[in-house]
Image (cartoon, helix red, strand yellow):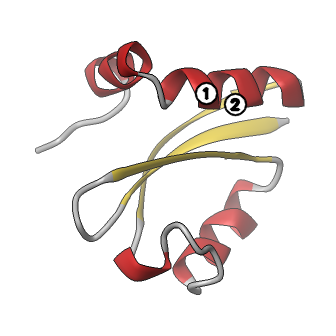
């Protein structure tokens, strides 16, 4: 199983990533081991999507980083309240 995940950072930005081990990857983010997020901790796991294949997860991550993908994610997965 692969996961595309959404983290809310301390600056209110949303970080999108994918991983095979969601629990461990979330820990590496909050331990400051990920360059892209270490300045904006703590991170909160807001949502995730699970898929069977790595290439599907990669394609979804790319989509959710696009303008229409961000709009879809905010409408369906992410509550900004």
- Residue 78 seen by the camera: yes
Q: Is residue 59 above or below residue 4?
A: above
Q: Would you call the spot at circle 1 few (<14 residues within 10 Å), some (14-19), or many (20 or more)?
A: some
At horizontal 80% and vertical 56% (from top left) the residue drawn is 21
Residue at 53% from the left image edge and 79% from the top image edge: 30
Q: Which residue is mark 2?
A: 50
- Which quarter of the rendered picture does the N terminus lie within? top right
Element marked by disc 1: helix
17 sits to left or right of 8: right
Residue 32 in which image quadrant? bottom right
Q: Nearer the viewer, residue 62 or 18?
A: 62
In three-dimensional space, the C-alpha distance between marks 1 and 2, rounded to whole angstroms, equals 15 Å
Label 2: few (<14), some (14–19) or many (≥20) C-alpha neighbours in 10 Å:
some
Task: Name the residue rendered at 50%, 26% in the picture.
Answer: 64
Label annotation for residue 62: 1
Earlier sequence position, callout 1 versus callout 2:
2
Task: Check the image and report above or below for 65 versus 71.
Answer: below
16 sits left or right of 74 in the view = right
């Amino acid at each position: 199983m692969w996961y595309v995940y959404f983290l809310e950072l301390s600056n209110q930005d949303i970080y999108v990533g994918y991983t095979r081990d969601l629990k461990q990857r979330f820990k590496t983010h909050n331990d400051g081991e990920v360059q892209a997020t270490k300045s904006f901790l703590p991170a909160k796991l807001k949502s995730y999507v699970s898929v069977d294949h790595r290439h599907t997860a990669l394609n979804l991550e790319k989509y959710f980083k696009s303008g229409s993908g961000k709009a879809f994610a905010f409408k369906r997965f992410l509550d900004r309240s």
